Image (cartoon, grey):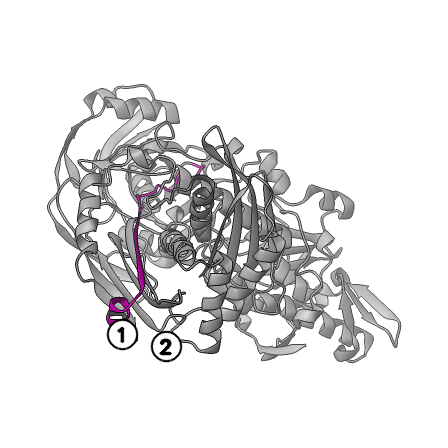
Amino acid sequence: MSRTESKLSRRNFLKSSALAGGGLMISFSWLVSCNSKREEALGLPEEWFELNGFLKIGDNGLVTIMAPNPEFGQNVTTSLPMIIGEELDVDWNKVIVEQAKFNTDVFTRQFAGGSQSVRQGWVNGLREAGAAAKYMLKEAAAKQWGVSASDITTKEGVLSHVASGNSAGYGEMASLAVGIEIPETLELKKPSELTLVGTARKNVRGKDIVTGKPMFGIDYEEEGMLIAMIIHPPAFGMRLKSFDATTAKQMSGIKEVFTITSFPNDEPRGYFSTDAFTETVVVVGNTTWEVMQAKKAVRVEWEQSPATQITTAGFGGTQQVTVPAGLENSTDHYRLMQQMAARPGRIERRDGNPEAAFKKAAKVIERTYTAPFLAHNAMEPMNFFARVTDDMVHLAGPLQAPEFAEQAVANRLGVPLEKVDIKMTRMGGGFGRRAYDHYVVEAALISRHMKAPVKLVYTREDDMTNGIYRPSYHATYRAALDENNNLIAFHAKAGGIPESPLHANRFPAGAVENYLAESWQIDSNITVGAFRAPRSNFIAGAEQSFLDEVAEAAGKDPIEFRLELLKRARENPVGDRNDYEADRYAGVLELVREKSNWDQPEEGVSRGVSAYFCHNSYVAHVLDVEMEGGEPRVKKVTCAVDCGIVINPLAAANMVEGAVVDGIGHSLYSYLTFNNGATEQNNFNRYRMIRHSEAPETIDVHFVKNDIAPTGLGEPPFPPVFAAVANALYKATGKRHYNQPYMVQQQISLG
């Protein structure tokens, strides 16, 4: 056992009542979605006893564990309760998982993003919640039996005292455990003692998902609920001038047409309060179809917006964001990026004397890589419910960052935080898109205006033309080799619209004596935001494609070339700011080399390798491609992952598989371009997504086994896919790919 200080206050753990019957809770919200088979087998208890904010135990031994974080497919609804259940020593077959409401008094970091849910949950309260409840149960049993709690053991929901022969299920002791004091330190299990964590457990919502149960925000309904949609400017750099809704207001089912302002430009905004079109026209009616038809009847006049300065509150304090005027074009974007790349950038890191090393090099390799804007395209349309009354703001829907949304709504409506209630629904996709709260604020403003419950719904076109895109990027790499083909200098210069993707202290920084990293950026009025593995999703593909080309120029195997560099970084690192562990990085490369049978590929198969570190985890892919009718067909992807202790191997493998499919699709097909500020792709008929038949036939996932605390997994497998695809395509066709997406680059004007 290891000892830890309790990270949760007694207010979070204990109810104010110390009565034995305290904590009675027998009602379930529509989001609970209990496991019916377990209910049928055990029957619902007559009483529930809440031992702390994370769990309650029924008098029959049934345990309800709260899943605190938002869920959009990463399966934290299963994995996070497993962490609690592990320390509780619960029988998983007697567990019901309930989606917790948003409540910062009880739960910390109810946020889905940054691949941090499991990592933060492991160290910030989940283990303590299970351990505290187990402590309380043991203390209750000790008092009941007149024995020492230290002599009581627990296993699968049963308390046992060998010497006296006493034993009891958790349900028998739950009422006696309520109110027992929690010590300052709690006993937590060592990695070798884990029995539930590390075992494959099916998604606790699996049946509900496949049978179409109402779990998502788009499913949410309340009596008297109206439907609302917005009309925003047709192009970035434009704003509302006037509108005429005379015809629309006379159409069947239409209640009202009016305007709202989500965020006034002269007021500071929150970190996730990004919104390109702050003033929009709103159409409200009885049904989705009626509102969609009425939108077409509204006559709107637009005008160009002036340049503005917006104050945003970031994690490191406030900052000024420049929003330029004008209607932007993709051809201009690429021309401007090429110009910026030719100028000196902002130096982010310098080791040694890279300029001198390049001058004396026997061979210099220089390559440039680009990537377009990308849309998130969550399968569930953007939506949110609001019911604003004089007393309360009731919100329900799919969102990744409820704490930020709560603050944004409270600020915009001018109400105290305690007057905002958020019910988190399951998300039908997100990956950054639903971290932004403008649509939540819009729903609240519309409900307040209508004095009625309202569900705001975006059409696919509304979402794809509304921003929060993955930025467009550009990177130029140079490498210098000496006469013995040793890498003696490395230069990375990267930028984008409107941010740089550069991570100056990541590999191969620390592995090359002479190293230079520069960045630049171009302001834009096109709104961007977090997209699965922000910045890494481009820079990994560029860096790892370039390293393959450098390895070829040096006459070395691409995996061996990387391992040689990592050996240098481990044994004699350059600089002290390297943000990766060379041993772990090398470990996934060695594992993927072994599991893919790298040295003996199948006949007719072309292979590409890539490895990357981000979000505290390490991932390597080997991707096998065959050409069929001139088109690439991904046959197999072998993945090696080091994310520390794996909570649920089944869910973890699913995340890696999804990231691989996602990465293949975006690397080959997806792009977003602009003409006079307007997106040229506004639905899936023009924005190419990967299809079922194009997914790999096999994705073989392997995890490094270690006792390191869990790290990120939702995002790290995604970035290295891009280069694995590019490197495999080169082996298959003899052609290097520098511009994403690889299969449709002729449709994008690169200037």
Label number found at residue 693: none
Marks 1 and 2: CB-CB under 8 Å? Answer: no
Q: Tell which of 349 and 122 is nearer to you.
A: 349
> Residue 386 sits in which quadrant?
top left
Answer with left or right where residue 674 lies relative to residue 737: left
- Can residue 414 be seen here? The reply is no
Q: Residue at x 29, y 42 (%)?
A: 467
For marks 1 and 2, the one nearer the N-term is 1
> Residue 292 sits in which quadrant?
top left
Place of residue 695 in the rendered image (x, y in percent of width and height, measured from the top left): 52, 37
Please provide the residue range marked out in magenta: 356-380
Answer with left or right where residue 660 lies relative to residue 726: right
Answer with left or right where residue 108 lies relative to residue 20: left
**CA separation, marks 1 and 2?**
13 Å
Is residue 226 inside the magenta stretch?
no
> Residue 153 sits in which quadrant?
bottom right
Crowd around label 2: few <14 · some 14–19 · many ≥20 (10 Å): some
Quarter occupied by the N terminus? bottom right
Secondary structure beneath disc 2? Answer: loop
Label 2 sits on residue: 575
Label 1 sits on residue: 353
Secondary structure beneath disc 1? Answer: loop
Crowd around label 1: few <14 · some 14–19 · many ≥20 (10 Å): few
